[in-house]
Image (cartoon, grey):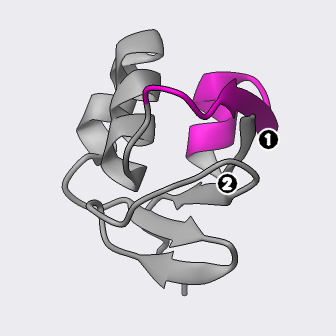
Amino acid sequence: MSIRVLFFASLADIAGTRETSLDAAGFPDVKSVFEKFTRDFPSFEGYRSSVLFSLNSEFARPGTPVKDGDEIAFFPPVSGG
């Protein structure tokens, strides 16, 4: 039972990886997965109000339920010119 987790841009830099997996048990929703990584990487806290969540390649709200086999991605805000 696992969840695939993808990190993009500066979040990947902070985590030191672009991808990892978690045991699905204990993670009822997308927000709980993000909170786990905020505990592991305190710098994630600065992104809390602006990070975008994706569940199985679709944008998701923090309270969206997750289950075994899901893929979650975290996207920081992007700017450019």
Is label 2 in a helix, a strand or a loop? loop
Q: Give the distance between the C-alpha atoms of the residues marked 2 and 1, in whole angstroms.
A: 6 Å
Report the quarter where the C terminus lies: bottom right
Q: Say which quarter of the image contains residue 10.
A: top right
Can you tell which mark lies on residue 8? 2
Residue 55 place in picture, x, y as percent = 58, 69
Front residue of 81/65: it is: 65
> Where is the N terminus found, in terms of image quarters?
top right
Q: Nearer the viewer, residue 38 or 63?
A: 63
Say if the magenta span includes residue 22: yes
Q: Are marks 2 and 1 in contact (CB under 8 Å)?
A: yes
**In the rendering, at what x and y percent does residue 48 appear?**
25, 46
- Residue type, mark 2 in image: Phe
Which residue is pictured at 19% across the width and 55% down the height?
49
The picture places residue 75, in percent across and down from the top left corner, at: 53, 61
Please check the rendered image and state whether residue 65 is part of the magenta-colored stretch, yes or no: no
Q: Earlier in the sequence, mark 2 or mark 1?
A: 2
Does 78 appear above or below 18?
Answer: below
Q: Amino acid at mark 1?
A: Arg
Q: Secondary structure at mark 1?
A: loop
In the drawing, does residue 19 fall left or right of residue 31? right
Of residues 32 and 28, the one nearer the viewer is 28
Residue at x-position 69% and y-position 58%: 70
- Residue under pointer 1: 18
Numbered range of the magenta stretch: 11-26
